[in-house]
Amino acid sequence: MRMCLVTACVMTLGIGAAQAASLTTLLSFTNTKGADPGADPQAGLIMDSSGDLFGTTIGGGATGVGTVFELTKGASSYTFSSLVAFNKTNGRDPFGGLLLDSSGNLYGTTASGGSPSFDGNVFKLTKSGSSYSLSTLATFTGTNGSSPVSGLIADSAGNLYGTASTGAASGYGSAFELVKNASSVNTLVTFNGSIGGDSAAGLIADSHGNLFGTTSTGGSGGNGTVFELVKGASSYTLSTLASFNNATGQTYAGLIMDSTGDLFGTTYSGGSGGVGTVFELAKGASGYTLNTLASFNTADGADPDAGLIEDGNGDLFGTTLYGGSAGDGTAFELTNGVSGYALSTLVSFNGTNGANPYDGLIADSSGDLFGTDSAGGTGNNGTVFEITNSGFEVTSATAVPEPPSWALLAGGMLAVAASRRRRAG
């Protein structure tokens, strides 16, 4: 497994796992009423070329319905800035992560809010100097989908792609495209239950522009699917690559893809322990084969809600929502060996250092990992954290998910899709 998901990859830094991983809390959210710090981050982070971090919260802000924030990297610490506080009319509940373009503009979705139907929207934060201005690019109406709870990807032309978890013709959601400079979304596929439904994760793409994603319900086993949208001359054709059942679990997370076209993800349930798995869909000449790489057992984590990242050794890293030594979730590694994958816990969250990470990890050029917890920290409103000595090996072939750029489709790979399981807000 080797892939490069960034425009400019980095050289080998030789990070090893000799030292124990160490967690540092970079920020505890305060949820101060009427103020901007925010609360309950359920999306992961993105990082720009300066090492600054960007993310969203679904609570807090001036009206209590979510924010976009930045942590600016300094010599020895990070400085917090609130970039926007949503107000329902311009959106609320940004469950999904952000997309960053080459000009520093940010793009994302809100799961609700937006006028006139309050079914969510696609937004842009245009950067001007050190400030940002918020604009709505498109609004969901129910008919064209509703409640997008995951982030976006972009092709080389600046067109945006994502999923809506509900709405559309059958009420099971859709996959959509927003053409650059257009104001309405194009529905690429409408889910109907039998072919899957309720997609809570974003999309990835291969070098041909084919799109891949997951649904959390439907399919032949009832517990969701992995699907491909095969790109044609003027439309996409849906193909179901795998269906999940009670034994294999249910997935809310997005996918990653290696250079051979194999797909990797997590299930929130199922497996030998009943509390989730890490799986591979191995690509063959006639289709994909579903393999379970690891099953969680609560002690080493439970209910992974997020997708994965891969390092230069082919090791996989991710988070679990629950389980671990304190029951508040973990960050884990799957070490890729000759005879299979070995699961190890990097960090157990304990409330004080954060709790319940809904989304996955990103890595910087030193192999340090960054993410968010939806709860815990000083005020129990969530945290932003860093894990050092993680063992994440950075090489010229590493999938370091630094900010998704407009060039990724042209380069042949899309960054790790943000996973999202919607909670009532």
Image (spheres, rainbow, N blue to C red):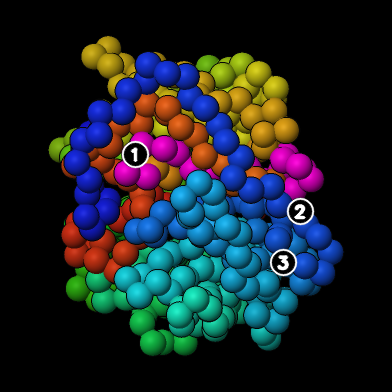
Local SS, label 2: loop
Q: Position of residue 66 (x, y in %)?
A: 69, 65
The answer to whether residue 293 shows anywhere in this view is no
As measured in the structure, the alpha-carbon distance from the residue carrying label 2 to the one carrying label 3 is: 9 Å
Residue at image point 56% right, 19% down: 300
Q: Quadrant location of residue 141? A: bottom right
Mark 2–mark 3 contact, CB under 8 Å?
Answer: no
- In the drawing, what numbered circle is on residue 159? none
Residue hosting label 2: 30
Q: Which type of secondary structure does the marked residue at label 3 adopt? A: loop
Density class for disc 2 (Cα within 10 Å; few <14, some 14-19, many ≥20) is many
| 378 within the magenta span | yes
Our reading of the magenta stretch's main secondary structure is loop
The kind of residue on which mark 1 rests is Ser
Q: State the extent of the magenta-drawn residues as a range.
A: 364-381
Q: Which residue is mark 1?
A: 366
Q: Which residue is mark 3?
A: 36
